[in-house]
Amino acid sequence: MKKLTIAALVTSSLLAANASASIVMVTDPGTSSKGNSAQIIAAPNAVTNSTVSNLGQQGFNEQQLVSLGSDLLVDGGSIVSGTNVASHMIFLNNPDGNNSLNSHENVVWEFSSNILGVMSDSGGTLEAASSALLGATGTTYPSAFGARGFEGPDNYIIDGNKLTVSMYVTQPGDWIRVITDVPEPASMALFGLGLMGLGFSRRRKNQA
């Protein structure tokens, strides 16, 4: 009975620890053209154009365990209904009235789980449509507006759990939403029980 209780506790801990997919690292090969490095930040109170600004790319985590009730549109396709996902935002936005070019190239954002898709359309329509479902709790998001997403030379490259992002902004800036997967709860439970089983087996062997 005691062993079963320990196994349940370990499994619960694994589920709690893995029911999210966060930004774990950002690697900046230099700085932006205005001299700022990329940063991971806490979700701000608002990400509207007039209330948030920075001089280097910044990223933050949004909702962490969402089971999609319908297909979710992303660049070039969709993520199917029933998928468990986590959401994250990356943005670069000059202060109001500052229309000089700020470029921040080849910044590598690393997540704790694989990337399923990105929302970067120029008008921000995909992002705006998903904010009620995926946006951070307590953060105010704007409606779609022109040039909110990627255009011109802006680009990204997906490589498993890494996203390489280059942004070139004047005013307004660029905001993109990154969707990652999260471990399936059933799989994590089996994994936890398997680990406990191996531990008990090794303990019996040592005692023998």
Image (spheres, rainbow, N blue to C red):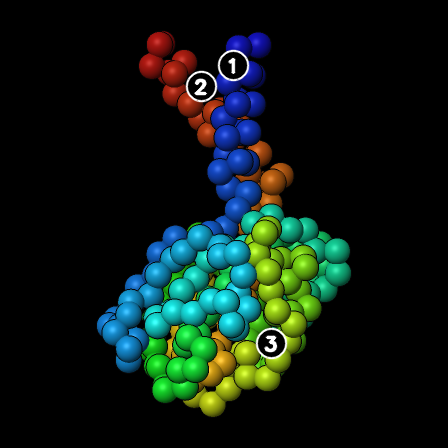
Q: Is residue 165 above or below residue 184?
A: below
Give the camera-side residue of 111 and 190.
111
What residue would you read off at disc 3? 124
Element carrying mark 2: helix
Q: How far apart are labels 3 and 1 at the CA level?
A: 52 Å
Residue at the bottom extreme of this rendering: 152
Amino acid type at image mark 3: Gly
> Circle 1 sits on which residue?
3
Q: Residue at x 64, y 76 (%)?
A: 144
Residue 144 in sight from this viewpoint: yes
91 relative position to 181: left or right: left
- Left or right: 17 as drawn, with respect to 134: left
Q: Nearer the viewer, mark 3 or mark 2?
A: 3
Q: Earlier in the sequence, mark 3 or mark 2?
A: 3
| Residue 116 seen by the camera | no
**Which quadrant would residue 153 be assigned to in this image?**
bottom left
Q: Which mark is residue 147?
A: none
* First of labels 3, 1 by sequence position: 1
Q: Nearer the viewer, residue 81 or 126?
A: 126
Q: Which sits in the foreground, 83 or 24? A: 24
